[in-house]
Image: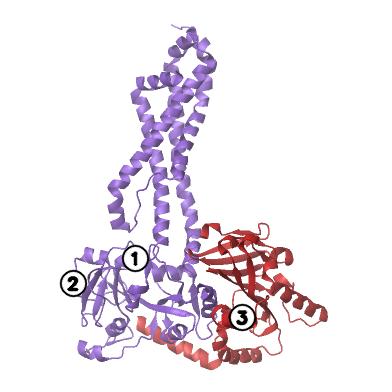
Chain colours: A red, B purple
Amino acid sequence: MIKSVSTLLVLLSAGAVTAQGMRQLDAHEHGVGHLDIAFDGDRIAMALHVPGADITGFEYAAKSSEDRAKVNEAVARLARPLDLFSLPDAAGCSVLEASASLESEAGQAEHEEHDTDGQSSEQMGGHRGETLPGENETEDHEHEHEHEHEHEHDSHGQEPAHSEFQAQYLLECNDPTRASLITFAYFEAFPKAMELDVQVITDRGATAFEVMRDAPTLDLRELF
Amino acid sequence: MILRLALASLRARLLTVGMTILAIALSVALFSGVEKVRTGAKASFADTISGTDLIMGARSGSVQLLLYSVFRIGNATNNLTWESYQDIAARPETDWIVPISLGDSHRQFRVMGTTTEFFDRYKFRAGRSLILAEGAVMDDVFDTVLGADVAATLGYAIGDPIVVAHGLASFVDHDNQPFRVSGILEKTGTPVDRTVIVSLRAIEAIHVDWQNGAAIPGQSTSAQTIRQMALEPQAVTAALIGVKSRLQVFGLQRAINDYPHEPLLAILPGVALQELWQIVGIAETALIAVSGMVVVTALIGMMATIFSSLNERRREMAIFRAMGARPRVILSLLIIEAAVMAAIGALAGLGMLYLGLLIAQPAIDASFGLWLPIEPPSLRELQVVLGVVAAGAIVSVGPALRAYRMSLADGMMVRI
């Protein structure tokens, strides 16, 4: 059984890849964004993925200067994590790295903003390779690029239906255990965002939460 | 003074009071027993895997992947190709990766193909490792390591030959390649206890003379030849992954989920467990509600007995009143009686629960793999006791008020 299924699978997947790259799309639900938070020592890594509709209200490629301004403003806002996810002052957190971008469905970044908060670039270089989840994908990049091209060809002439804002943050805190009460100013900043699905990893393992617009706080104290 | 009266009065009606107390005790034992099983099951589920950052499998649902890869419940929809497995293993974030290959069985137990790294990496109950009770981990292609329950149920010892059946609940045995028991694990309270562990190469080896799910007639490869074959697996069912830095877990998860060549799924075990609880939560609530209703029934039963006892005690109440007891003495006497009954019942219920646990604990562990710890009563159990006492006092207010109103007039007018 196993063997026959597996050979079949190998054939199938090989065929699919050589022909034109596998077709797959992430789930996309307007109003619901995803936030991943990992606590490790004095570092906190966060990754945010939100449908374009939640942030700017539209998902087509920005054409008018008004739309472009909106996107730029949103990306700039998303690159300031502590304004969106406020941590208690007692935690003493500062931003080591923050980047935000708008990705359309085909995968190409349309706008990007990198922001570093008062850290020397030397130090930054040291952290980059090992910590930012997004950065680690560089190896596959060439690979992916080919597929992206195909995708562009495929959908030539038609707009990508959905777009997603992505942001990656790396924070450093004096006392990360006190960073456990997070207030989501995010919902004030983006009135169309309704919900964030949050995944958290701490020493005690992984858990998931849903943070809603009408109760925009997250209490992680039991995880420390 | 009233308490003494109440106790004496209860003692005087020992039989009915005893029955009422028994009903309350049983209901409390049931209620806290359900609670114990619920938390115990939750804890033992959560304890089944720790130290693994991600579980990777073919794309399906996160709960499903968790169930078949860790709990051996249900089956995989697809396997994941060895190529993809190696791609993920080679990623810089990956610290370690352990393959899991399921699909064969031995008697009623599942056979799992993996690497010897599994014994170092698989952790349960807050970081405990698997320990061999006897023997050693597999060294040869045909070596197997048995979970504690497998060895105990089938009576295997080190060195015994065993035959692995093809597929689950299947009729064909791979009898041309007999395996040998090389090690037996200590009991863990996890599904590993009910698993036959072989090497990944062994899973390939048993299928050497098989094609399309059937043995090739007249063809049989000797064990020696098989040992020399490369036996590279083409697919595995799932993989446990450890990530170098916790900060990279989500990055790797996303990379696996967006893997361009094969639909893969990576889950965080803790998050998937939580999703599972959300599903099971409805049944849990129903169970608690039902056992809660049993407690309510017992308390209403107590109210009924108090009501009916009022008739017998008309005289008694009247005499109290005649001797100068105020109506509220009567009221509080009845309420205190009820509260005392409820308290004795609740405490006896807890006692019954602990007694039951003491007796049944090993049996429950053996038959369901569910370890229910015997711990001093938790805050929640004390809350239950207090709640029952309070509820007992409250339901007795009805009969007590009736006695309060009637005590004088009713008892003094002797009707013959």
Q: Is residue B382 above or below residue B44?
A: above
Numbered circle sitting on residue A124? 3
Label 2 crowd (10 A; few <14 / some 14-19 / many >=20): some
Q: Do the CB atoms of the residues marked 1 and 2 lie less than 8 Å apart? A: no
Label 3 crowd (10 A; few <14 / some 14-19 / many >=20): few
The image quarter in which residue B368 lies: bottom left
Check the image and name the residue furthest to the right: A65
Residue B107 place in picture, x, y as percent: 25, 70
Amino acid type of the residue tagged 1 in the rendering: Pro
| Residue designated by label 1 | B191
Q: Chain of mark 2?
A: B
Q: Is residue B237 above or below residue A196?
A: below
Amino acid type of the residue tagged 3 in the rendering: Met
Residue A11 place in picture, x, y as percent: 44, 89
Q: Is residue B23 above or below residue A100?
A: above
Q: Chain of mark 3?
A: A
Circle nearer the viewer, 1 or 3? 3
Numbered circle sitting on residue B158? 2
Circle nearer the viewer, 2 or 3? 3
Residue B33 place in picture, x, y as percent: 39, 46
